[in-house]
Image (cartoon, rainbow, N blue to C red):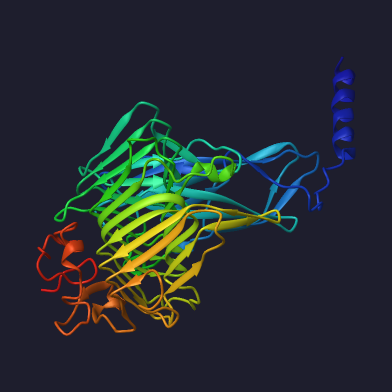
């Protein structure tokens, strides 16, 4: 019996010595698999605190994998801390994962919510390089106490979203805590989102507010407490940085449930407001939307693309300022119905070259070799269209197949293409500097009583909008634009 056991042990030793180790894969198609593509620390910190999450890294192949580099991209300055397979650091090299095995990464974040420069969303990423392939895992943590809206659904061809007002539901956002949107906050068909005065909304990169077909958005601020919608980066560098989030996207509302935006500040995105009629997707029953967008007493500024982008929509805008946009301040394609009174468009975009006009009007689209024309009606009254380009009004109006009219009545405009002898222009001033206080700081008040815009408005038009954006009475001798000179 003793000899038998010795024989077994000897056999095991021989077998162990003869067994080959797994080869290390060099195949560039072999990639790691992660337990998640985003490590989300969804704890809302109300005091100084930390939280730890884990990430599992898998090798699902029959060969070993060598990870040549693992890097916490924020380095030593990152708010996140990394413990990889028992070691603490920010960079790791040549980590082996055996065939059909895994390793653990433990991630810790420490947040001080009392630091007002802390972004609402704190981000970093882990980079893994394996056989020449680079893969990343995002790290996301909430930085301050707020109400977080996190996208959890996705449809093919559309961005990720979260339904925040479902069908037949009215949801109210109030000013007790800020709202932070990660992805798109979606208003479903026959749902309503009502945003009340003083509410602060911060939108993360790529996100926005989206009203689906037959949904309704109501923004109801006041002069003292406007609703503010902007990016979620709070560091001083980002205060006037455009392009931090995507857009407010309004699809066709249901009749009798107009989209309303009053006393709002919408800034630092890609497109301030995109409004589009759903009939554009079929071209069969082309009509202007039955429920208009009504904008009043609002500022739409500092967007890398457009301030307002409209397609076959109906928009009424009063006392609205649109400024500093990288392409167009107000762009219309495919027609629609528009009435603007006492609006100021001042576009002195300086972050990159701009060759487009501030206001662009078009009533058609070309698709698959066919031209589709749409009804178009535009009136702009007691307003200013000015900026750094020689021609701040551009038009592309086509044919006689549909009703098309436009009127600029008592407006101050920068243009060498048009004058009061042209149809569609009445009592306008051309190429006279309105003398804004300081367009570089987005202050488009009239700076001087000598401004040509002072007293140049029509009293009959002013009666329709008797008070300016800040509540000053403009009846009697109205100025052009959203602000009455004081």
Q: Is residue 42 left or right of residue 94?
A: left
From the viewer's perspective, is residue 275 above or below residue 409? above
Q: Residue at x 30, y 76 (%)?
A: 428
Q: Quadrant of the N terminus?
A: top right
In this view, the residue in front, 90 or 407, is 407
Q: Residue at x 72, y 47 (%)?
A: 31
What residue occupies the far top of the structure in this picture?
1
Q: Residue at x 46, y 59 (%)?
A: 332
| Residue 438 can be seen in this image | yes
> Picture quarter containing residue 472?
bottom left
From the viewer's perspective, is residue 485 above or below residue 4? below
Q: Quadrant of the C terminus?
A: bottom left
In this view, the residue in front, 363 or 354, is 363
Residue 383 image offset from top left, x and y in percent: 28, 68
In this view, the residue in front, 89 or 439, is 439
| Residue 245 can be seen in this image | no
Q: Is residue 349 left or right of residue 364?
A: left
Count of numbered circles in the view: 0
């Amino acid at each position: 019996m003793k000899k038998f056991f010795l024989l077994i042990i000897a056999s095991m030793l021989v077998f162990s010595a003869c067994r080959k180790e797994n080869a290390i894969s060099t195949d560039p198609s072999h990639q790691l698999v992660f337990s998640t593509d985003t490590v989300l620390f969804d704890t809302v910190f109300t005091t100084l605190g930390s939280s730890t999450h884990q990430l599992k890294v898998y090798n699902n192949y029959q060969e070993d994998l060598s990870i040549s580099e693992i890097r916490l991209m924020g380095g030593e300055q990152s708010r996140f801390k990394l413990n990889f397979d028992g070691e603490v650091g920010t960079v790791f090299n040549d980590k082996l994962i055996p065939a059909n095995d895994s390793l653990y990464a433990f991630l810790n974040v420490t947040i001080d919510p009392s630091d007002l420069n802390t972004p609402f969303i704190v981000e970093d990423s882990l980079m893994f390089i394996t056989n020449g392939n680079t893969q990343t895992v995002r790290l996301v943590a909430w930085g301050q106490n707020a109400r977080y809206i996190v996208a959890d659904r996705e449809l093919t061809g559309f961005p990720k979203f979260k339904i925040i007002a479902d069908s037949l539901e009215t949801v109210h956002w109030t000013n007790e805590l800020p709202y932070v949107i990660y992805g798109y906050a979606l208003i479903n068909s026959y749902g309503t989102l009502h945003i009340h005065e003083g509410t602060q909304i911060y939108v993360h990169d790529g996100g926005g507010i989206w009203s689906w077909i037959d949904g309704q958005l109501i923004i109801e601020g006041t002069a003292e407490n406007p609703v503010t919608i902007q990016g979620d980066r709070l560091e001083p560098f980002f205060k006037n940085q455009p392009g931090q989030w995507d857009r407010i996207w309004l699809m066709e509302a249901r009749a009798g449930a107009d989209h309303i935006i009053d006393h709002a500040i919408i800034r630092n995105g890609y497109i301030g407001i995109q409004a589009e009629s759903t009939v554009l997707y079929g071209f069969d029953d082309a009509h202007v939307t039955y429920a208009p967008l009504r904008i009043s007493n609002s500022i739409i500024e500092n967007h890398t693309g457009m301030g307002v982008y409209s397609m076959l929509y109906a928009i009424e805008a009063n006392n609205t300022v649109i400024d500093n946009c990288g392409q167009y301040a107000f762009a219309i394609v495919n027609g629609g119905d528009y009435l603007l009174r006492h609006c100021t468009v001042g576009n002195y975009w300086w972050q990159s070259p701009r060759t487009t006009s501030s206001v662009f009007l078009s009533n058609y689209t070309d698709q698959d070799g066919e031209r589709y024309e749409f009804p178009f009606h535009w009136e702009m009254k007691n307003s200013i269209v000015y900026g750094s380009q020689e021609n701040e009004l551009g038009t592309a109006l086509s044919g006689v197949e549909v009703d098309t009219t436009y009127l600029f009545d008592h407006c101050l405009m920068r243009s060498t293409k048009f004058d009061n002898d042209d149809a569609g222009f009445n009592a306008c001033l051309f190429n006279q500097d309105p003398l804004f206080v300081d367009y570089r700081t987005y202050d488009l008040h009239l700076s001087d009583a000598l401004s040509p815009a002072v007293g140049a408005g029509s009293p009959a038009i002013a009666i329709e909008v008797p008070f300016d954006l800040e509540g000053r009475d403009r009846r009697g001798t109205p100025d052009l634009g959203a602000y009455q000179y004081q």
